Image (cartoon, helix red, strand yellow):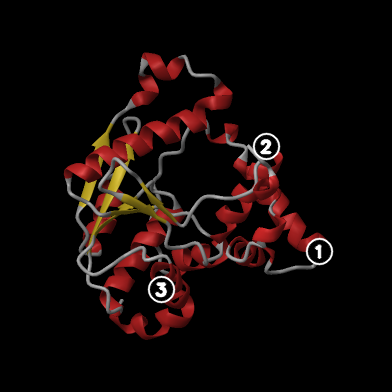
Amino acid sequence: MENNYKSMKNWFLKDLIKAVTKYKMINNGDRVTVALSGGKDSVTMLYMLYILKKQSHINFELSAIHIKTSNYDTSNLKEFAEKFETPYYDVDIEFENSKDFSSINKNSICYWCSKVKRGALLKFANQLNIDKIAFGHHADDVAETFLMNIIQNRKLGSFSPKVIYDNQHCEIVRPMIYIRESKISEIHSKMNLPTLKYRCPFESENIRGGFKEKTKEIEKIFEKKDFVLSLINSLENIDETNIWKNLILD
């Protein structure tokens, strides 16, 4: 790995550092943990943050937490984290066989699952006195969430690069917001990084896949290769004078 470090800046470090510094995601002395789902995005982010820790001026501690929802093997995640000198934790909640889980409406499972997992993650991270929890959302996720909010939820916006809670010590950060999914796939493949073999049985219920395809179609229709990055730039360059909500009197 050492021989590859010099090429990392142009490959991904520049965009990673841009997000981390612009939104003050990681500071000297921070205890940072990766929400390691086991998918290519979170696995690649752990690798990126390890490189950031080794190559940048930011001095921080790094760990990884996996929220385990059923009885499956996570040994490859543990081995991967240990390979990159990163403490790894399994948090076992196994709710898939619970009575509460079986009664959830299929259309609400993804939302419910995400909420439960985030709650368990925050609770455990606070016990470890973690300062920042890094989520593996990337630039394409920003665009897809933006479109989903307009079409499904009738609101304008996407998720925030950083979430600060009033009642929690931890903050949630998203260091990959300027990095395209295609780049993450390239890194994951070239560095031969692992993925969790377990697949969620309700994966097909998630509507995000449809919006992923529609986002790609928009790029083709308008011949706009960097539509996703343009949308992110727009979120950072809002014309406040033309936001209708500002004109509504309570």
Tell me, yes or no, if residue 15 can be seen here: yes
Q: CA distance from mark 1 to mark 2?
A: 22 Å
Residue at 30%, 67% (x, y): give it.
50
Say the numbered circle drawn on residue 17. Answer: 3
Earlier in the chain: of badge 1 and badge 2, it is: 2
Badge 2: few (under 14), some or many (20 or more) residues near its Cα, within 10 Å?
A: few
Q: 142 above or below 91? A: below
Circle 2: residue type: Gln
Location of mark 1 (residue): 222
Q: Residue furthest left?
A: 128
Residue at which label 2 appears: 152
At 56% from the left and 22% from the top, the residue drawn is 106
Q: Are marks 3 and 2 in contact (CB under 8 Å)?
A: no
Q: Label 1: how many residues lie within 10 Å, few (<14), some (14-19) or many (20+)?
A: few
Given this view, does label 1 or label 2 mark the residue nearer the observer?
2
Tell me whether circle 1 and circle 2 mark residues in contact (CB < 8 Å). no
Residue most extreme to the right: 221
Query: Extreme front residue here?
Result: 249
| N-term-proximal mark, 3 vs 2 | 3
Dot 1 lies on which element?
loop
Quadrant location of the C terminus? top right
**Could you say which quadrant of the image residue 231 lies in?**
bottom right
The foreground one among 6 and 165 is 165
